Image (cartoon, rainbow, N blue to C red):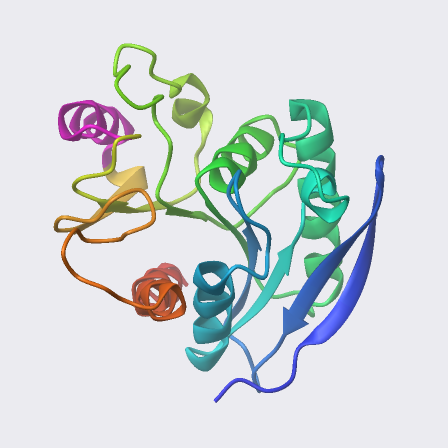
Amino acid sequence: MAGPEERLTIDTVKGPVSARFARPPSPSATIVVAHGAGAGMDHPFLAGFSRACVDEGIASLRFNFPYLESGRRSPDTEPVLRDAWRAAFAAASDRADGGPVWASGKSLGGRIASMAAADGEIAPAGLVFLGYPLHPPGKPERVRDEHLYRLEVPMLFLQGTADPFASPDVLERVLAKLGDRATFVAFEGGGHSFEVRGRKRDPREVGASLAPHAAAFIRDDR
């Protein structure tokens, strides 16, 4: 089982934000996990995923973006979100003892990580997307994928087949263009938070169920 979490404060351009770090004995890697637009780092889904990664032998650091830290509902501007990612990634790298550091995130958090990585603002060993928002719901023509093709690191897309932010045909086209840089794991009937209609599950359990896929991908890349 994962040990106690260390409570951290990370400085950003909008002030300090909270973070949680946990490390198993002799971790194979460290993963930095960012939350989605609507809920912070302590949402059961994100906490479940992060803690289960530690049980899988991977250190984890999850953090809040400034808007959630201050109790606001509307996400920060893109530069502020990127700055928070840079700060969190640096904090994780300081604790990684030279080991590989991966970037991960739910929806918005994963998209900002990929943009920062594509522009060289962070240098992750790879990316793990927990429901990537390829387009707004109902608007598959507005695909947000251009920066993904500039990434040279391995990417794991964990995606529900009923996710309104990633229609299957759009996702298939993007994955085909990414080629062997991308690996896709489908969760049948899963929505944007991997919820399945008609099946009630604790969000913490849902998040934790994704960790073995992430851990196996990270270990296989070593």
Span of residues in magenta: 166-179
- Residue at 46% across / 48% down in the picture? 126
Answer with left or right where residue 21 lies relative to residue 133.
right
Q: Nearer the viewer, residue 219 or 133?
A: 133
Q: Residue 171, can we see it?
A: yes
Label tally: 0
- Residue at 24% across / 37% down in the picture? 163
- Residue at 67% across / 33% down in the picture? 81
Q: Nearer the viewer, residue 36 or 6?
A: 36
* Location of residue 133 in the rendering, given as x and y in whole percent from the top left corner: 37, 31
Secondary structure predominantly adopted by residues drawn in magenta: helix
* Location of residue 211 in the rendering, given as x and y in whole percent from the top left corner: 37, 66
Answer with left or right where residue 62 lies relative to residue 156.
right
Quarter of the image holding residue 137? top left
Above or below residue 160? Residue 80 is above
Image quarter hosting the C terminus: bottom left
Q: Residue 96, can we see it?
A: no
User: Is residue 150 shown in magenta?
Assistant: no
* Location of residue 86 in the rendering, given as x and y in whole percent from the top left corner: 71, 41
- Residue at 43% across / 74% down in the picture? 52
* Location of residue 3 in the rendering, given as x and y in whole percent from the top left corner: 59, 87
